[in-house]
Image (cartoon, rainbow, N blue to C red):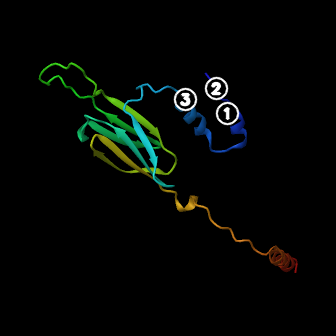
Amino acid sequence: MTTFDFSPLYRTSIGFDRLASLLSSAQRLEQNGGYPPYNILAEDENHYRITMAVAGFGQDDLEITSEENTLTVSGKGQDDEGEDGRFLHRGIATRAFERRFNLADHVKVTGAALENGLLHISLEREVPEAMKPRKIEIGNSSARLIEVGKDEEEKAA
């Protein structure tokens, strides 16, 4: 197994302390074996969609929670014991599951819909105005130096 040393990153970067924990959790094998399968689509720069194949689950069987930077989708297992007859083959999984997604800062869940056995979750990145790039005006340095010099002369007088 390959391991990575992130200590050089910590020496030159500030605020990336979550990076190592995110990468180490991504390296771990998924406990649920990839069930249910899902797609992640970047619709544009700030809009994303997660689509999960949840055949056999209804709206009441699924739960979506968003807490801090984690989106959790879970499904309650269904009991098919009431079915008449015996299964000769059982290929449609109805077991309980829990799938977690790490969300970047300022990514919010905007909606969810269940359609034809697919759960669609819409996400949007909402960057606050304070975080957006802004243009800094460049002033005339000689004018600023003259103003500073005048202030010092006035104080001396």
- Amino acid at circle 2: Thr
Give the Cα distance between marks 1 and 2.
10 Å
- Secondary structure beneath dot 2 equals loop
Q: Residue 10: percent from the left, percent from the top?
A: 69, 38
The residue identified by callout 2 is 3
The residue identified by callout 3 is 27
The residue identified by callout 1 is 6
Q: Residue at x 25, y 22 (%)?
A: 90
Instruction: Name the mark nearer the viewer: 1 or 2.
Output: 2
- Amino acid at circle 1: Phe
Q: Residue 77: percent from the left, percent from the top?
A: 27, 28
- Amino acid at circle 3: Gln
Residue reaching furthest left?
Answer: 84
Q: Are marks 1 and 2 in contact (CB under 8 Å)?
A: no
The answer to which of 99 and 105 lies nearer the viewer is 99
Q: Which image quadrant for residue 51? A: top left
The answer to which of 57 and 20 lies nearer the viewer is 57
Precedes in sequence: disc 2 or disc 3: 2
Q: Residue 6: percent from the left, percent from the top?
A: 67, 33
The answer to which of 2 and 66 lies nearer the viewer is 2
